[in-house]
Amino acid sequence: MTQTIEPGNPEVPTRADDTGAGHHSAAATPGSVPAALKRRVPKYSDLAPLMQFKKPEFSRAARLRRASTIWDLRDMAKRRTPQAPFDYTDGAAEAEITLRRAREAFLDIEFRPGILRDVSRVDLGTEILGKPSRLPVGIAPTGFTRMMQSEGEYAGSQAAAAAGIPYTLSTMGTASIEDVAAAAPDGRNWFQLYLWTDRDRSLELIERAAKAGNDTLMVTVDTAVAGARLRDVRNGMTIPPALTIKTVLDASYRPAWWFNFLTHEPLTFASLSRYTGTVADLINSMFDPTLTFDDLDWLRETWKGKLVVKGIQTVDDARRVVDHGADGVVLSNHGGRQLDRAPIPFHLLPDVSTALRADNSDAAVILDTGIMSGADIIAALALGADFTLIGRAYLYGLMAGGRAGVDRAIEILEKDMLRTMALLGVSRISELTPDHVRILKK
């Protein structure tokens, strides 16, 4: 016979014959105050475990450890970097609508986690362009990097090598192809190319990149003319930075940056002749506005390694560059720095991925622009990206703390990715699908 036990009513006093006891403790007396709620003088033995006072730390390492997000690193970078180079990194074209939309795109999603999956071990490793990468993210090409912080490309390439991810050197970098290869001999180095009107100089760079061991050439195709980067115009941004009354006053608040800048080798373009002037003037004077798909064919014949085209902003162009021999495409609007109100790569991603798969293409789909967290990276992978690139995110780390700051940026993104994958119920990149992400409609 099954006995049913009804839950007791706390409002009804318990009778002695219900419990088999003839008396009650003081704690059970109706209306009495539980011992835990009675006030008393605290004992030292109670306080001792709570007193964990630490000596204040003001070192760079301590500051970087306190950074929990890329936004924290950005705040540190802004405090430590003069306005002109910080704004060059942080800003975008015209009203900066594209950059704002790109970041909002990652916010306007909903993750759809699976439960009761074994995520005791999460593997972020992947393969990109025929070789393994420990994380599904690499460092994008950025120009004038030693202007942001004196360690520049050396810090970026060494941090990437240590993390087991690719590093991309820009044509407009401030360290040479050979010097980056020497600084990170065990790293996977890629080279980003702007095609110039002078094809012989472009060919020279291609040959140097191959000789230095770069396995991938990334040609950027969205700079027929310079975008209107109004922060740079208002700051009077020049290369190298000019010493004016404004910059000298700005330096008084950032002495460490100016000390590093003035006591290291003068800032120059390692792949270009010495140049003095604005960034826009440089782009407009050197880069070729007559580029066509025939030039891509020439590059495909010339470069024997992997060829990636950066600056793809439509499905049709993604298909065309693959037809012309590209091994991969980078969906990018140049970080919002060229055409304002350009397409957002994250929005374009599902259509490009679907189109290339429908063509039975194995071309890699890489995404940049707007990434500020590891969750952003996981969302991109779920919606069809094979790989991602970060530009500003690592530069904020560089400005915040040099090589150690870049290491910290990568570490933050890795922790974000591991946590997001585990909470999604996914243990490997290959398990991510579009079902894990829903784009919210406004």
Image (spheres, grey):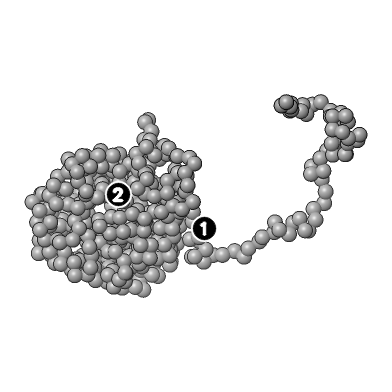
Can you tell which quarter of the image residue 250 is in? bottom left
Q: Amino acid at mark 2?
A: Asp
Mark 1 highlights which residue? 66
Q: Residues within 10 Å of mark 1 (few under 14, many from 20)?
A: few
Q: 206 left or right of 162?
A: left
In this rendering, which labeled residue sits more in front, label 1 or label 2? Answer: 2
| Quarter of the C terminus within the rendering | top left
Query: At x 54% / y 65%, what residue is drawn?
Result: 58
Q: Nearer the viewer, residue 160 or 17?
A: 17
Q: Dot 1 lies on which element?
A: helix
Q: Which mark is residue 301?
A: none
Q: Nearer the viewer, residue 320 or 18?
A: 18
Query: At x 17% / y 54%, what residue is drawn?
Result: 284
Above or below for 394 versus 267: above
Can you tell which quarter of the image residue 273 is in? bottom left
Can you tell which quarter of the image residue 44 is in? bottom right
Query: At x 28% / y 69%, what residue is drawn?
Result: 180
Task: Where is residue 36? Give x, y as percent.
Answer: 79, 44
Query: At x 41% / y 62%, what residue is drawn?
Result: 407
Q: Nearer the viewer, residue 66 or 280?
A: 66
Task: Where is residue 256? Give x, y as percent.
Answer: 43, 67
Q: Residues within 10 Å of mark 2 (few under 14, many from 20)?
A: many
Task: Where is residue 334? Give x, y as percent.
Answer: 26, 49
Q: 198 left or right of 68?
A: left
How far is disc 1 from disc 2 in space, using C-alphas? 31 Å
Mark 2 highlights which residue? 386
| Residue 377 visible (yes or no) | no
Residues marked 1 and 2 touching at CB (< 8 Å): no
Q: Amino acid at mark 1?
A: Arg
| Quarter of the N terminus within the rendering | top right
Task: Where is residue 184? Give x, y as percent.
Answer: 32, 69
Q: 416 left or right of 40?
A: left
